[in-house]
Amino acid sequence: MENKLLVSSSPHISSPVKTKNIMRDVIIALMPALVASIIFFGARALLIEVVSVATCVVCEYLCRKIMKREQTIGDLSAVVTGLLLAFNLPSGVPLYVPIIGGGVAIIIAKQMFGGIGQNFVNPALLARIVLMNSFPVLMTTWPVTNFDTSDAVTAATPLALSKAGQAFPSYLDMFLGNTGGCLGETSALALLIGGIYLIVKHVISPIIPCVYIGVVFVLAAALGLDPVMQILSGGLFLGAFFMATDYVTSPLTNKGKVIYALCMGIMTILIRRFASLPEGVSYSIVLMNIIVPLIERKTIPLPFGVVKEAKKK
Amino acid sequence: MAKQSGLLARMGFVKYPGAAVPHRKHTSDTPTEVMPVPATVEIVMSMHIGAPCTPTVKVKDHVDVGTVIGTNTGFLSTIIHSSVSGTVKKIDTVLMPNGSKAKAVVIETDGQQTLDPNIKPPVINSREDFIEAVKQSGLVGLGGAGFPTHIKLNPAPDVLEKVDTLIINAAECEPYITADEHEILENYENVIYGITKVKECLDAKQVIIGIEDNKPKAIALMKEKIKDYDYIRVEELPARYPQGAEKVLIDTCTGREVPPGKLPADVGVVVMNVASIGFLGGYLKTGIPLTTKRVTVDGNCVTNPKNVRVLIGTKIKDIMDFCGGYKKQPTKLISGGPMMGMALMTDDFPVLKQNNAFLAFDEEEAKIYEPTSCIRCGRCVNACPMRLMPTKMEDAVNYKDVDALKKLNVMTCMECGCCAYVCPANRKLVQAFRIGKTLVRNAGK
């Protein structure tokens, strides 16, 4: 035994699941929605997605380089942000929109706060909100899907139609995604497949999507809205499975997750029902992201063997 | 842990404590082999929790198997016996794997293995006799902790009053190790005999033998052999690490949670490792003290992985040679399992009483991954069997924030390694908590 032995702290083995694998799983889970976006909105959808992902990766690369930090583009988290951002854009936007959005998401929301794990809001959602307020017209002009039989060039989203008191598309069209809307949000089916994949692979906890969607359904029914339409429309599935479950900006404990998702559901339905905006998913998630540290402070679990009584003193 | 590992936990709706570590029980089907007497043995005077022993022999003294070679008069200590017959060559000071120094008696063996003439089965007429006999046997907790057994079996009268359950720990949740499984398969008679005697000593009402369900042969055999004892039952434990951790085991078997800073006896339970009880059963019949140990030798650098019954004090390199030597250059040598075991700096180190495995890993298996940023995925929080918040604790350690560490109950951490195992960012969590515990301890001074 001439060679020296390695001495290190236990444990001496580690799980094969690494940050990169997790991000890869999220990308895989987003693929059905990506395919659906191309089916319904054509090659233009793919172009926007590619530009958005490329912008995010390049921004991340440059930020790390300029800040002289270790390079993190290999963990694929920038790709996830790029895809999610693209999914939040209508297919008709000019290409500078995803470029600006990608820059805002990666440079401002993510890298300025220290990079992966440090952002306090979901980067893609913050970028969406910035874009919504900067280009309100571009961001709310939704081209019709490839299967639209009318002569119209643009379509309103089901939520906007509903808010205006007009007839909205059939449940089936909404479930499949054959409605006006942002690239990745229209097909509930594709998002559901991706979401279930993430739950089965233990990438995300089922608590947040189940509670969030459940609360929206129940409250919609209670407030006299069509509950099925409310959960199938807008960005709810995209938000519930892919954005609200973002690790960095959601609570660590199960109890915290329930509180977080519950509040998001309430906020979403209040915005949809009473605010002037038709959609409230992105604002609900971003607002709850900010409250997560407070939720966390109140949901530290009692350690093993400690009984409730011991806490009162 | 059992009660929490239902379908909802598997689906992620409720906390699923522990980690799905690989089992790698390669040596499960190979019977234990007895290793021949090596040329020399090196018996360390500190292989238990408590005060180290002082050698009671001098250089050139002749010793037999079972001759007392180390004692200590302190309360928390034990007795150390020679595992061989031969001549004391020298009294040495050795560097222990944890960096401390200890005395060691080096004995040149004569190969005769003659038994010390004073050895005879203990005569037991009372509880006090029993405790004294256990003390004379040199038994310490063989599961790894090395806590002197005669002290564990002799709690204060008011605590003893509360004890109603004896749990035999045969969970063996660490990957690779199968020594306890073979203890059941090969020594079940002594295990059961030991149980009856300890049960009597503690006046316990029930005895639970906890075995993880990845050992069906051991479970079937044990169930068959305890049929005539109405107070003994076998508990099939879910094979999820760290099922064999004392607090987790007690919770699974009885639903009782041991509060932080308390002992199992405070909730009416005494836990003994199956190898300890098996030894005790044999000792009560023969009077031969603790001089041998069954260890699992495995890892991808070992030519013939197997269980070996070795004499205490045998050098690890001699055991490795007995197992066919290294088939490739090991990068890491671990005493114990890969989750909680200790990395050794050399194989020129003797077997201690509480050792149960030696693993030799190659470069690939011993790879240390560079830590990346915490992504707050919460896997560590979900995995922690003590319901702590590892990621928050790590932050507190980095800030040297003793108040936060106390608030987060860092002292409750048992260093099982689940958090660090599941961390996708390779954070060195257990390492951080060891520092955190030291910070808290020093702050109290």
Image (spheres, coloured by chain):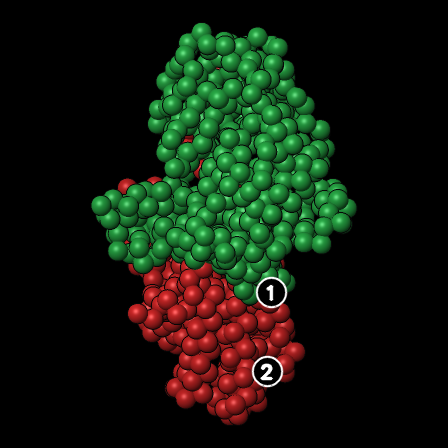
For label 2, the SS is helix
Task: Mark yes or no: residue B101 visible.
Answer: yes
Dot 2 crowding, Cα within 10 Å, few <14, some 14–19, many 20+ = some
Quadrant in which residue A134 is drawn:
bottom left
Dot 1 crowding, Cα within 10 Å, few <14, some 14–19, many 20+ = few
Which residue occupies the foreground of this view, B21 or A108? B21
Residue A82 is situated, as x and y percent measured from the top left of the image, at: 44, 57
Host chain of mark 1:
B
Q: Find residue B8 and name its label.
A: 1
Task: Mark yes or no: residue B420 visible.
Answer: no
User: Residue shown at 24%/48% (left/top)?
Assistant: B444
User: Residue shown at 40%/43% (left/top)?
Assistant: B430
Q: Find residue A228 and name its label.
A: 2
Q: Look at the image and give the colour of chain B.
A: green
Q: Amino acid at mark 2?
A: Val
Host chain of mark 2:
A
Label 2 to label 1: alpha-carbon separation: 26 Å
